[in-house]
Image (cartoon, grey):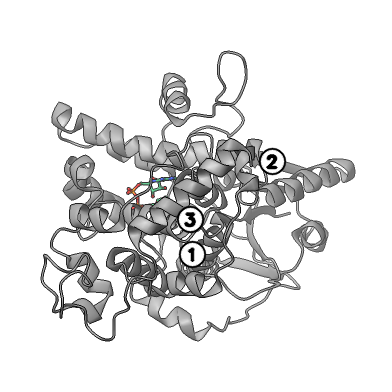
Amino acid sequence: KPAIVWLREDFRLADNAALTAAAQTAAPLLLVYIRTERSSGMTAADWFREKTLARFDADLRQLGGGVHVFTGDPARLLPEIVVRVGAAAVFWNRRYDPIGREIDAGLKREFAACGTEAHSFAGALFHEPWTVKNRAGQPFKIFSAYWRAACEAGSPRPPLPAPREFKFFAGSVTGAQEEQLSWPAWTSSLDAHHEFGEATAQDRLARFVAEDLGHYEDERDFPDRDATSGLSPYLRVGQITPRQVWNAVSDAPGGLAHAAARAKFLAELGWRDFAWSVLWEHPSLDGHALREEFEGLPWRNDPSGLEAWKRGRTGYPLVDAGMRELWRSGVMHNRVRMVAASFLVKHLLIDWRLGEQWFAETLADYDPASNALNWQWCAGTGADSAPFFRIMNPVLQSRKFDPSGAYIRRWVPELKSVSDKDIHAPWESPGTRPANYPLPIVDHSAARRRALATWERVRGGD
Ligand code: FAD
């Protein structure tokens, strides 16, 4: 009788608690992935997940196994598969999104009622999202307090090694598909920017720890330097776990000299945990402002402004470089995500939820918790946010964090020949702006005044 390992966000052999526990039963393993039917087109995150799944399957085939892929509603399909193969037990690592957790709880009840063993394990976070609480037993609203408490709870347990011995279920599994997905044309530009696989993720971590960790704190905000880990898509699909990252970072050489960089980097990973804990408490985080007063903010209906922002044609080079990086590569540097998000919400006064949705479609590392929390943070609508009245100046941000314009030139080729000095605001010096690059769609000072006046009205309650 096989043991089923239901894969969802955990395409890895090492530090995979569900897989390890299933292997320890000595039953042959049946690895199952259930693709849900899409009501709309493929997103960049779907693309990354599917490519990862294909790579994981190929890796498992080298070991004589593979992943059995099904399409449909897991609430119906998983019990059917259990019956079809006569499985002894089902194992999975927990996920924490509102829909997923409801499906999993329903399945747990159903399996309990029919006597099938179902074992679930902590997912890919440092702490389960409901566990880090303040002294009054309440969830934290502020990251710094959350992270202090999380760190006081102790280091995460060491990552598990890949199970040394296991065998795959060799019987036939009716309903499993060998289907080749067809990729929409737009995904072809993503291919050049990503590599897949558990080993690739581990290599990337090792390289980051060896080469970049020591100057992470000083350089992480500069988008043209390859100074961050680039691990977010791998973390999202579980090709690597935060525990593995913690372990590698804690063991990194550099001693006290690198202590601040290490602490800063681990705290960034802490934001990921924090986001999941906030989503756990507020399942409608992507649709509802945490600060109620912002629900009354009169957002502008501006389809052409929204389109210019999505396509990287706002006339603000740093914003445009970021939005084009996103469209072409499926990722965007964190500093530029902040500037681009702030521009949409404050300069254009467009509802943050529309930006959140665009990121959800186009980010390869799209994560419902981190994306929603960060959008609320940038919009000023979250509990632990930059205040709404603090408005980032996209030109000053550009001069500060991309001083030579190298990042802008990489993504906005029209500006290739503009000087380092003029590239941040090419409309300011006569004859500098190439004809094929737009003028700013809003004037910074006027947009700033408009945002502040709108915010005053919301605050004043009229
Ligand atoms: P590193 O700097 O190397 O950080 C290491 C890891 O820490 C990241 O891989 C990520 O898992 C975590 N991390 C870092 N910063 C943050 C943060 N601010 N919030 C949560 N986790 C963080 N990150 C996502 O993973 N998915 C998203 O959908 C997402 N949407 C975002 C939307 C906006 C508007 C903003 C401002 C940020 C968003 N982020 C999101 C956070 C951050 O931009 C990315 O995690 C980061 O750019 C990934 O690059 P990296 O792996 O090189 O990061």
Measuring 13% from the left and 79% from the top, which residue is drawn there?
417
Up/down of 123 relative to 36, above or below: above
Q: Is residue 75 visible?
A: yes
Measuring 42% from the left and 23% from the top, which residue is drawn there?
148
- Residue 27 picture location, percent across and down: 65, 50
Disc 3 packing (10 Å; few <14; some 14–19; many ≥20) = many
Disc 1 packing (10 Å; few <14; some 14–19; many ≥20) = many
Q: Earlier in the sequence, mark 1 or mark 3?
A: 1
Viewer-nearest residue: 320 or 222:
320
**For residue 115, what is the image quadrant?**
top right
Disc 2 packing (10 Å; few <14; some 14–19; many ≥20) = some
Say which residue label 2 marks.
Answer: 119
Q: Earlier in the sequence, mark 2 or mark 1?
A: 1
Q: Is residue 13 visible?
A: no
Q: Say left or right for 322 vs 414.
A: right
- Residue 210 picture location, percent across and down: 18, 47
Q: Amino acid at mark 3?
A: Val
Image depth: mark 2 or mark 3 in front: 3
Viewer-nearest residue: 320 or 60:
320
Query: Which quadrant of the rendered structure holds the N terminus?
Result: bottom right
Measuring 69% from the left and 51% from the top, which residue is drawn there?
100
Say which residue label 1 marks.
Answer: 56
Q: Earlier in the sequence, mark 2 or mark 3?
A: 2
Q: Amino acid at mark 1?
A: Phe
- Marks 1 and 3, Cα distance to the nearest angstrom? 39 Å
- Marks 2 and 1, Cα distance to the nearest angstrom? 22 Å
Name of the residue lying farthest toward the top: 135
Is there CB contact under 8 Å for labels 2 and 3?
no
- The local secondary structure at tag 3 comes to helix
Q: Say left or right for 199 vs 252.
A: right
Give the numbered dot on residue 103.
none
